[in-house]
Image (spheres, grey):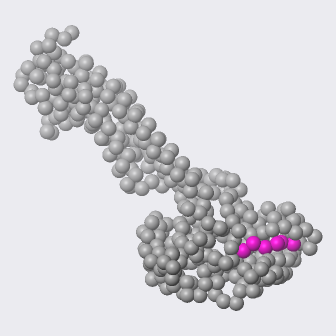
Amino acid sequence: MSNIFKLAARNLFRYKRRTLLTSMLITLGVVAVLLFIAVSGSFKALMVGQITDSMLGHIQIHKKGYLASIDSLPLNRNLTGKQLDKIVQVLAEEDGVEAYSMRIRLGAMFSNFIETTNIRLNAVTPTDEIKTAPLLSDRLLAGDKEGLIKQGEILIPELLAKGMKVKVGDAIVLVANNKDGSVNGQTFVVRGILEGISGPGGRDGMIHIDDAKSLLRIGTAEVSEVAIRLKDIDQLPAVFARLQKKLGSIKTQQGGAVFEMHTWEKISPFFNIAKMIDLMTFFIKIMLVAIVLVSIMNVMVMAVYERINEIGTISAIGTLPNKILALFIVEGLLMGILGTTIGTVISLVSIAIMNVTQIRFDFGRQTGLLLSPTIGVADVVLVVAMVIAIAVIASLQPAWKASRMDPITALKHV
């Protein structure tokens, strides 16, 4: 077998220009795919981090039916008493959970004493919210970021601040109805202005959870949702499955589920963009397969045609057809290995250079985001294995044709 590899390598070097051009095609394909995977993967991870770490968390737990009516922010579907105790117990037993934040979500009327409009509010415990959404403070365009928020203070969305001409330090009034329908009002001081983001949450303000309980006249433990941050987002499916198993088994007296759980993917519209990135990556891989298949097959067909006399000679002196078949397949294999090796090296060096140069970009309202392309060993191995496999497959038909040539006919070929 070693002799076949030596002969195959010698044959490739006999036709240096053709081998070089084919290897370059494979190299360019590999570089394009690996760089696209690295850059698109980094962009997707960055955007997912921005969405989950500044607002949503990785997993959210609600009372069954809450999410279906979330547009109206229903207060009669809040989690209470024993339900919250069970959630806290389950989260304490789960090693994959890093932090969680209990939130009350409500709608209210917002007044600057001149004009009035509606506002959506997230009421939180500041210390828990900062641990669950560590990038939340970065969304503050104005105001003191230390400690996030205190009782009697409010963070308002940028859109509302501009429309109502409200600035940091101004006094405003919130008026809200509790679940029994009674109305209550309370004065707040604007602590900061939150940067607007796309999707749900772009118009949300924030107050302290104790203020929400006072405004809504809630005297017991009661929250709308529990947002969870994981230690490792890659463990999301496994942790979600474990939590779902423990909490999903809890039923009401009528046999219905008590809780509903959702990952950030089900809540955020950005997940559709993430799926599009994955789809584009898939089609880029298909293009790579086509490039390798066409280039290798073309080279091998030409190699067989130009070496008909040579094939006839080695057949006439007793070389078995399977040896000839193996010779041409190994030539395709070596070209695939050569192209992928060079392409992988160029790709890894390019990724390292991009990380050193620290490429920054703007996305919507967010500026100065740092792109840090990375690629996993599994992705590299998959692309390399795919290219080499296609190179071998592309060599099969020409190699089969060469191995089945009649020696006499081949020797007569001019």
Check the picture and name the quadrant holding the C terminus: top left
Where 335 falls versus 278 (above or below)?
above
Look at the image and say whether residue 18 sits in the magenta stretch.
no
The image quadrant that residue 338 belongs to is top left
Check the picture and name the quadrant holding the N terminus: top left
Q: Is residue 298 visible?
A: yes
Residue, x 22% and y 35% (percent of image)? 330
Residue, x 78% and y 64% (percent of image)? 158
Residue, x 32% and y 28% (percent of image)? 297
| Percent x, y of residue 157 | 76, 66
**310 left or right, relative to 257:** left
Please give the count of numbered marks on the rendered protein. 0
| Percent x, y of residue 316 | 8, 20
Q: Magenta: predominant secondary structure element? A: strand
**Which range of residues does the magenta coloring cover?**
106-111
| Percent x, y of residue 377 | 38, 55
**299 left or right, relative to 320:** right
Where 195 falls versus 29 (above or below)?
below
Residue, x 47% and y 70% (percent of image)? 240
Q: Nearer the viewer, residue 396 or 175?
A: 175
**61 left or right, relative to 193:** left
**2 left or right, relative to 230:** left
Q: Nearer the viewer, residue 148 or 206?
A: 206
Residue found at the very far left of the displayed protein: 318
The image quadrant that residue 134 belongs to is bottom right
